[in-house]
Amino acid sequence: MDEFQLASENIVILYSDYVVYDMLLHDVEIVYGEFASTALMLRDGYLFEGIWIAKGEDAPLQVLYQGSNYFYKPGKTWFIFVTKNSEFKMEEIGEYYLSFLRP
């Protein structure tokens, strides 16, 4: 298993279904409209749980926290798509572990 540390002002983990073509080839399935899926946002060592929505092909993804747009800290933001069965846990305060599980 490959492990690496990721540090950024904002890290957003977007849970999604996948379209599987074969064992190594798959696409993220983005459903346009009002369909929402889980989003985890990490900022300053804190974890926020929200949702993400894709309203259309020409509209940016929306990440919502408590029903409103999530506000990012100025700086770099990493967006990571993972399968809905991927594992996420807190190792210790401010330190989290994400394991991507194949669809």
Image: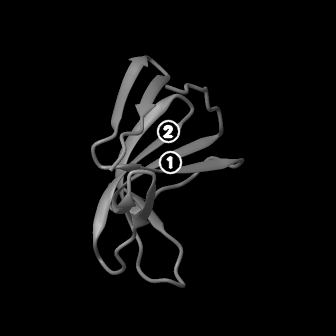
Element type where label 1 sits in the image:
strand
Report x, y in % for residue 15: 36, 52
> Which one is nearer the viewer's eye here, 103 or 57?
103
Name the residue located 72 percent from the left edge and 47 percent from the top edge: 75
Element type where label 2 sits in the image:
strand
Whether residue 2 is situated above or below residue 83 in the rendered picture: above
User: Residue 42, which numbered label?
Assistant: 2
The reply to whether callout 2 and callout 1 are in contact (CB within 8 Å) is: yes
Whether residue 93 is situated above or below residue 97 in the rendered picture: above
Q: Residues within 10 Å of mark 1 (few under 14, many from 20)?
A: many
The answer to whether 4 appears left or right of 98 in the picture is right
Report x, y in % for residue 7: 64, 32
Name the residue located 35 percent from the left edge and 26 percent from the top edge: 89
User: Residue 12, which numbered label?
Assistant: 1
Going by the numbered disc 2, the residue's amino acid type is Leu
Task: State the CA–CA distance, disc 2 to disc 1.
Answer: 6 Å
Report x, y in % for residue 61: 48, 69
User: Residue 54, which numbered label?
Assistant: none
Name the residue located 62 percent from the left edge and 47 percent from the top edge: 73
Report x, y in % for residue 47: 42, 35
To which quarter of the image does residue 30 belong? Answer: bottom left
Q: Residues within 10 Å of mark 2 (few under 14, many from 20)?
A: many
Name the residue located 52 percent from the left edge and 80 percent from the top edge: 59
To which quarter of the image does residue 102 belong? Answer: top left
